[in-house]
Image (tube, helix red, strand yellow):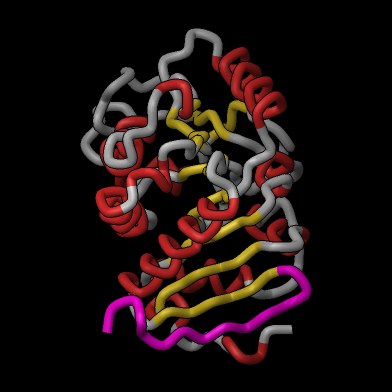
Amino acid sequence: MGYTERMETARTNGLALKVADTYDAMSHTAADFICAELRQRPSLLLCASAGATPTRTYELLAARHNRQPKLFERLRVIQIDEWGGLAPGGSATCAADLRTKLLEPLRITRNRYVGFRTDATDAEAECGRIARWLAANGPIDVCILGLGSNGHVGMNEPAEALTPHAHVAALAVSSRKHAMLKGLPQRPRYGLTLGLGDILRSRRILLLVNGKRKRPALKRLILPRVTPRFPASFLWLHPDATVLCDGEAAAGLPVRQLP
Protein backbone atom coordinates (compact mmCIF):
# COMPACT_ATOMS: atom_id res chain seq x y z
CA MET A 1 0.00 0.00 0.00
CA GLY A 2 3.08 2.28 0.11
CA TYR A 3 2.83 5.68 1.68
CA THR A 4 -0.96 5.45 1.94
CA GLU A 5 -0.67 2.78 4.63
CA ARG A 6 -2.37 3.22 7.97
CA MET A 7 -0.92 5.90 10.24
CA GLU A 8 -1.68 6.09 13.94
CA THR A 9 -0.95 9.21 15.94
CA ALA A 10 -0.76 9.92 19.66
CA ARG A 11 -0.22 13.49 20.79
CA THR A 12 1.23 14.92 23.96
CA ASN A 13 1.80 18.49 25.14
CA GLY A 14 4.78 18.83 22.80
CA LEU A 15 5.90 15.42 21.60
CA ALA A 16 3.82 13.64 18.95
CA LEU A 17 4.24 9.97 18.09
CA LYS A 18 3.22 8.88 14.59
CA VAL A 19 3.31 5.21 13.66
CA ALA A 20 3.36 4.03 10.04
CA ASP A 21 2.91 0.39 9.14
CA THR A 22 6.25 0.06 7.35
CA TYR A 23 9.64 1.72 6.95
CA ASP A 24 8.70 2.75 3.43
CA ALA A 25 5.47 4.37 4.57
CA MET A 26 7.38 6.14 7.36
CA SER A 27 9.89 7.44 4.81
CA HIS A 28 7.15 8.70 2.47
CA THR A 29 5.62 10.62 5.35
CA ALA A 30 8.99 12.14 6.25
CA ALA A 31 9.67 13.19 2.65
CA ASP A 32 6.19 14.73 2.36
CA PHE A 33 6.79 16.59 5.63
CA ILE A 34 10.04 18.12 4.34
CA CYS A 35 8.54 19.07 0.98
CA ALA A 36 5.56 20.73 2.64
CA GLU A 37 7.92 22.80 4.76
CA LEU A 38 9.96 23.74 1.68
CA ARG A 39 6.86 25.08 -0.03
CA GLN A 40 6.32 27.37 2.94
CA ARG A 41 10.03 28.30 3.28
CA PRO A 42 11.96 27.97 -0.01
CA SER A 43 15.31 28.78 1.66
CA LEU A 44 14.62 26.33 4.48
CA LEU A 45 17.62 25.24 6.59
CA LEU A 46 17.53 21.47 6.92
CA CYS A 47 19.65 19.77 9.58
CA ALA A 48 20.51 16.38 8.10
CA SER A 49 21.60 13.15 9.77
CA ALA A 50 23.61 10.43 8.04
CA GLY A 51 23.16 6.67 8.43
CA ALA A 52 20.64 4.06 7.41
CA THR A 53 17.43 5.39 8.96
CA PRO A 54 16.88 8.44 6.69
CA THR A 55 18.20 6.72 3.55
CA ARG A 56 14.79 6.00 2.02
CA THR A 57 13.56 9.50 2.89
CA TYR A 58 16.51 10.97 0.99
CA GLU A 59 15.82 8.66 -1.97
CA LEU A 60 12.25 9.92 -2.10
CA LEU A 61 13.44 13.54 -1.94
CA ALA A 62 15.79 12.81 -4.85
CA ALA A 63 12.86 11.41 -6.85
CA ARG A 64 10.83 14.52 -6.02
CA HIS A 65 13.75 16.69 -7.14
CA ASN A 66 13.71 14.97 -10.52
CA ARG A 67 10.08 16.01 -10.93
CA GLN A 68 10.22 19.40 -9.21
CA PRO A 69 13.81 20.72 -9.21
CA LYS A 70 12.74 24.30 -8.48
CA LEU A 71 11.36 23.23 -5.11
CA PHE A 72 14.90 22.52 -3.91
CA GLU A 73 16.89 25.28 -5.59
CA ARG A 74 17.17 27.40 -2.42
CA LEU A 75 17.26 24.62 0.17
CA ARG A 76 20.15 24.89 2.63
CA VAL A 77 21.63 21.96 4.56
CA ILE A 78 23.67 21.76 7.75
CA GLN A 79 25.27 18.50 8.86
CA ILE A 80 24.34 17.50 12.40
CA ASP A 81 27.48 15.51 13.26
CA GLU A 82 30.64 13.84 12.02
CA TRP A 83 33.05 11.15 13.17
CA GLY A 84 36.31 12.69 14.34
CA GLY A 85 39.72 11.93 12.92
CA LEU A 86 38.73 10.10 9.73
CA ALA A 87 40.34 10.83 6.38
CA PRO A 88 38.27 13.37 4.43
CA GLY A 89 36.24 11.84 1.65
CA GLY A 90 36.40 8.37 3.20
CA SER A 91 33.32 6.25 2.69
CA ALA A 92 32.75 5.93 6.46
CA THR A 93 32.34 9.67 7.00
CA CYS A 94 28.94 11.21 7.54
CA ALA A 95 29.85 13.81 4.91
CA ALA A 96 30.33 11.11 2.27
CA ASP A 97 27.01 9.50 3.22
CA LEU A 98 25.16 12.80 2.93
CA ARG A 99 26.93 13.75 -0.28
CA THR A 100 25.88 10.51 -1.98
CA LYS A 101 22.32 10.33 -0.67
CA LEU A 102 21.26 13.96 -0.32
CA LEU A 103 23.61 16.71 -1.48
CA GLU A 104 24.40 15.48 -4.98
CA PRO A 105 20.89 14.18 -5.81
CA LEU A 106 19.34 17.48 -4.71
CA ARG A 107 22.08 19.56 -6.39
CA ILE A 108 22.97 21.33 -3.15
CA THR A 109 25.75 23.75 -4.04
CA ARG A 110 28.69 24.46 -1.73
CA ASN A 111 27.31 27.83 -0.68
CA ARG A 112 24.13 26.08 0.54
CA TYR A 113 25.84 23.44 2.66
CA VAL A 114 27.93 23.52 5.82
CA GLY A 115 29.43 20.54 7.59
CA PHE A 116 32.12 19.51 10.02
CA ARG A 117 35.61 18.71 8.74
CA THR A 118 36.41 15.26 10.09
CA ASP A 119 40.17 15.82 9.75
CA ALA A 120 40.25 19.22 11.45
CA THR A 121 43.58 19.65 13.28
CA ASP A 122 41.75 21.58 16.01
CA ALA A 123 38.38 19.92 16.60
CA GLU A 124 37.26 22.53 19.13
CA ALA A 125 38.00 25.33 16.68
CA GLU A 126 36.08 23.45 14.00
CA CYS A 127 33.06 23.26 16.29
CA GLY A 128 33.42 26.99 16.90
CA ARG A 129 33.32 27.59 13.14
CA ILE A 130 30.06 25.65 12.82
CA ALA A 131 28.60 27.42 15.86
CA ARG A 132 29.37 30.83 14.35
CA TRP A 133 27.85 29.82 11.01
CA LEU A 134 24.65 28.64 12.68
CA ALA A 135 24.42 31.79 14.80
CA ALA A 136 24.65 33.89 11.63
CA ASN A 137 22.46 31.74 9.36
CA GLY A 138 20.09 29.86 11.65
CA PRO A 139 18.12 28.79 13.41
CA ILE A 140 17.40 25.40 11.87
CA ASP A 141 13.96 25.14 10.28
CA VAL A 142 13.62 21.34 10.15
CA CYS A 143 15.91 19.01 12.10
CA ILE A 144 15.97 15.37 11.00
CA LEU A 145 17.17 13.11 13.82
CA GLY A 146 17.83 9.44 14.38
CA LEU A 147 17.52 7.71 17.75
CA GLY A 148 20.55 5.93 19.17
CA SER A 149 20.04 2.71 21.07
CA ASN A 150 21.38 4.51 24.16
CA GLY A 151 19.18 7.55 23.54
CA HIS A 152 21.72 9.75 21.80
CA VAL A 153 20.65 12.27 19.18
CA GLY A 154 23.37 13.58 16.91
CA MET A 155 26.45 12.60 18.86
CA ASN A 156 25.07 13.95 22.12
CA GLU A 157 25.80 10.93 24.28
CA PRO A 158 24.32 10.10 27.72
CA ALA A 159 26.19 12.03 30.41
CA GLU A 160 25.78 13.81 33.73
CA ALA A 161 25.53 17.10 31.83
CA LEU A 162 25.09 18.05 28.18
CA THR A 163 26.84 20.74 26.11
CA PRO A 164 24.24 23.00 24.47
CA HIS A 165 26.08 24.01 21.30
CA ALA A 166 28.50 22.54 18.72
CA HIS A 167 31.17 20.58 20.55
CA VAL A 168 33.57 17.66 20.56
CA ALA A 169 31.87 14.60 22.07
CA ALA A 170 33.45 11.45 23.49
CA LEU A 171 31.70 8.53 21.81
CA ALA A 172 29.98 5.81 23.79
CA VAL A 173 31.13 2.24 23.17
CA SER A 174 27.83 1.48 21.44
CA SER A 175 28.30 4.42 19.07
CA ARG A 176 31.79 3.25 18.13
CA LYS A 177 30.16 0.01 16.94
CA HIS A 178 27.99 1.89 14.44
CA ALA A 179 27.50 0.11 11.12
CA MET A 180 29.05 3.06 9.25
CA LEU A 181 32.39 2.30 10.96
CA LYS A 182 32.43 -1.39 10.18
CA GLY A 183 35.70 -2.50 8.66
CA LEU A 184 37.78 0.47 9.80
CA PRO A 185 41.15 -0.60 11.26
CA GLN A 186 40.73 1.99 14.01
CA ARG A 187 37.38 3.40 15.03
CA PRO A 188 37.01 7.04 16.10
CA ARG A 189 36.77 7.81 19.80
CA TYR A 190 35.21 11.25 19.41
CA GLY A 191 32.74 13.05 17.24
CA LEU A 192 31.87 16.63 16.32
CA THR A 193 28.22 17.47 16.82
CA LEU A 194 25.61 20.15 17.20
CA GLY A 195 24.37 20.37 20.78
CA LEU A 196 20.94 19.88 22.30
CA GLY A 197 20.53 23.64 22.54
CA ASP A 198 21.00 23.95 18.77
CA ILE A 199 18.57 21.11 18.15
CA LEU A 200 15.91 22.49 20.48
CA ARG A 201 16.07 25.88 18.78
CA SER A 202 14.90 24.23 15.56
CA ARG A 203 11.50 25.38 14.40
CA ARG A 204 10.36 21.78 13.82
CA ILE A 205 11.97 18.45 14.74
CA LEU A 206 11.38 15.08 13.10
CA LEU A 207 12.85 12.04 14.84
CA LEU A 208 12.87 8.91 12.65
CA VAL A 209 12.84 5.51 14.35
CA ASN A 210 12.65 2.17 12.58
CA GLY A 211 13.19 -1.50 13.31
CA LYS A 212 12.78 -3.67 16.36
CA ARG A 213 16.34 -2.93 17.49
CA LYS A 214 15.21 0.61 18.40
CA ARG A 215 12.10 -0.57 20.24
CA PRO A 216 13.63 -0.39 23.78
CA ALA A 217 14.89 3.16 23.19
CA LEU A 218 11.53 4.25 21.77
CA LYS A 219 9.74 2.69 24.72
CA ARG A 220 11.89 4.74 27.07
CA LEU A 221 11.45 7.91 25.02
CA ILE A 222 7.66 7.99 25.25
CA LEU A 223 7.88 8.28 29.03
CA PRO A 224 7.73 11.99 29.96
CA ARG A 225 10.97 12.07 31.95
CA VAL A 226 13.79 14.38 30.87
CA THR A 227 17.32 13.35 31.79
CA PRO A 228 20.82 13.90 30.29
CA ARG A 229 21.30 10.16 30.72
CA PHE A 230 18.89 9.80 27.79
CA PRO A 231 19.46 12.85 25.57
CA ALA A 232 16.49 12.21 23.25
CA SER A 233 14.22 12.84 26.24
CA PHE A 234 14.95 16.57 25.84
CA LEU A 235 12.62 16.54 22.84
CA TRP A 236 9.84 16.68 25.42
CA LEU A 237 10.87 20.32 25.93
CA HIS A 238 10.26 21.28 22.31
CA PRO A 239 6.84 22.65 21.27
CA ASP A 240 6.80 20.96 17.84
CA ALA A 241 8.70 17.67 17.87
CA THR A 242 7.39 14.59 16.09
CA VAL A 243 8.57 11.01 16.51
CA LEU A 244 7.86 9.16 13.28
CA CYS A 245 8.34 5.40 13.50
CA ASP A 246 7.45 2.18 11.74
CA GLY A 247 5.37 -0.69 13.05
CA GLU A 248 8.40 -2.78 14.00
CA ALA A 249 9.77 -0.08 16.28
CA ALA A 250 6.38 0.63 17.85
CA ALA A 251 5.21 -2.97 18.28
CA GLY A 252 3.74 -3.49 21.74
CA LEU A 253 3.95 0.17 22.69
CA PRO A 254 0.85 1.92 24.08
CA VAL A 255 0.45 4.24 21.11
CA ARG A 256 -3.03 5.38 22.14
CA GLN A 257 -2.14 5.67 25.82
CA LEU A 258 0.60 8.30 25.82
CA PRO A 259 0.29 10.75 28.69
- The residue sitting at the top extreme is 121
Vertical placement of 45 versus 128: above or below? below
Which residue does the image show at 47% across and 43% down from the upper left? 48
Q: Residue at x 71, y 27 (%)?
A: 135
Question: Residue 89, how many percent across, how many down?
Answer: 28, 22
Magenta stretch holds residue 178: no
What quarter of the picture does the C terminus occupy? bottom right
Relative height, residue 5 to residue 162 (above, below): below
Q: Residue 215, position in %: x, y?
A: 47, 73
Name the residue rendered at 67%, 34% in the picture.
138
The one of 102 and 248 positioned closer to us in this rendering:
102
Q: Is residue 3 magenta?
A: yes
State the image coordinates of residue 101 (x, y, percent, origin top left): 29, 43
Q: Is residue 148 visible?
A: no
In front of the other: 242 or 229? 242
Q: Nearer the viewer, residue 198 or 158?
A: 198
24 vs 140, left or right, is left
Residue 54 visible within the image: yes
Task: Name the quadrant of the N terminus.
Answer: bottom left
Above or below, 148 relative to 196: below
| Residue at (60, 66) in percent of width and height | 242
Which residues, given as a range, are shown in magenta? 1-14
Quadrant for residue 16, please give it: bottom right
Relative side of 46 to 26, left or right: right
